[in-house]
Amino acid sequence: MRYYTAGESHGQGLVAIIEGVPAGLKVSEEQINIDLARRQSGYGRGGRQKIERDTVQVISGIRFGRTMGSPVAMIVKNRDWENWTDRMAPFGEAPLDLVREVTPRPGHADLVGALKTNTDDCRNILERSSARTTAPRVAAAGIAREFLAELGVDIFSYVVSIGSVSMREENPYMNAAQYTPLAIETSEVRCPDAEATEAMKREIDRAIKTKDSLGGTFRVVVRGLLPGVGDYAVPTERLTSTIGGALFSIPAIKGVEFGMGFECARRPGSQVHDPIELDRANAKFTRTSNNAGGLEGGMTTGMPLVVTAAMKPIPTLMQPLQTVNLDTLEVAQASKERSDVCAVPAAAVVAEGEVAFALADAYMRKFGSDNMADIKAAIKAYKQRLNTMSR
């Protein structure tokens, strides 16, 4: 299962096409719209969220709420398009009063994209590299999430830190799966630590006053995974590779850790690797710790998958940094776009979808992809074999 997207931040809409979708999968339009709303929420979001009220329109691949086995196509329309019809028109001449974007923002794709594509208007770059283009990703991910949910796999995320403020956690790689997603969603920054939530909000308020922006870290947790999903023989199909690549495809993500992550490099092996034991009551192998974050050798261990990602501060600043004007080649201030101060909670929702796609694809590589009945039968047989091996 994979997806493609098209569309610009201020274009008519954002399109997603998902292919490799098995037939017979029940899909909820309401749940996709809930996830789209989650992507737009969070303390520190900007004015664009007051304009857009994202909803999905499915135009192919689903009939009476179930997939048909053909590609699924969907669109998320941009309400702001009506304010940009002259500046983003697909055809015709550019308006005489068109203001080109010639002062690229440090930290954004503006300058290097302009150099790559030989344009003197950064608008051509920033429209596609905008975080707004993650909306169709979240919509598309609704298919992957429904697929995994039907197989007993659920995904959620929470914010670990914003700026210099971090939540307090003891052994998060074992305990992260115990958090209640509902409690996370009621937090304004989607952090399960109430005290840290208030401190994060104060940190965002300070950034608003100083016309700055903030990044942070978030954690994606997946429960209910079978062991042995993924691959060790083909490097590009290791889940560390596919999930890592998927997360790095999200704008502003600068670091990804599986389980203990970089801390592994500072500890001896006896404090890193997860001892194996046999759970005789349930006839399965398990681990006494989860420092690996649910992956070994590029495959799932059966423990919860725990992935932490770091997001850099948003590059659009209301007090801009120095840049160079592309017309005059003189020193200038970077351009200002309507933007967020902090979008870490929103990025976490996008990350859930990316992880879901990587896992859904790995499940179908192992258990088939034609239809849900055959996939479930293959999984049932696999579970029976695992039980036999662990007796």
Image: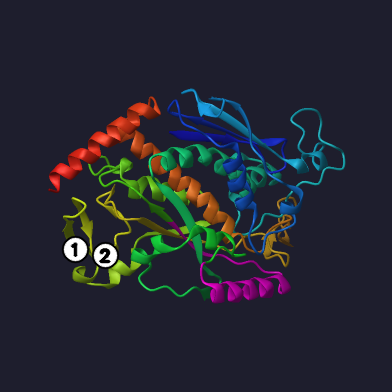
Circle 2 residue? 289
Residue type of the residue flagged with mark 1: Pro
In the image, taking residue 129 as reference, residue 51 lies left or right, namely right
Circle 1 residue? 275
Query: Residue 64 occupies which quadrant of the picture?
Result: top right
At 40% from the left and 63% from the top, the residue drawn is 178
Task: Point out the stretch of residues depicted in magenta.
Answer: 192-220
At 64% from the left and 49% from the top, the residue drawn is 37
Residue type of the residue flagged with mark 2: Ser
Q: Is residue 203 visible?
A: yes
Which secondary structure, mark 2? loop
In the image, taking residue 84 as reference, residue 29 lies left or right, namely left
Which secondary structure, mark 1? loop
At 37% from the left and 66% from the top, the residue drawn is 175
Marks 1 and 2: CB-CB under 8 Å?
yes
In the image, taking residue 38 as reference, residue 255 lies left or right, namely left
275, 326: nearer the viewer: 275
Asked if the magenta segment contains residue 207, the reply would be: yes
Q: In the picture, which quadrant includes the N terminus?
A: top left
At 73% from the left and 47% from the top, the residue drawn is 52
Neighbourhood count class around disc 2 (C-alpha, 10 Å): few under 14, some 14–19, many 20 upward: some
Asked if the magenta segment contains residue 359, the reply would be: no
In the rendering, at what x and y percent does residue 298 appear? 28, 48
In this picture the colour scheme is rainbow
| 352 w.r.t. 21: above or below | below
Q: Earlier in the sequence, mark 1 or mark 2?
A: 1
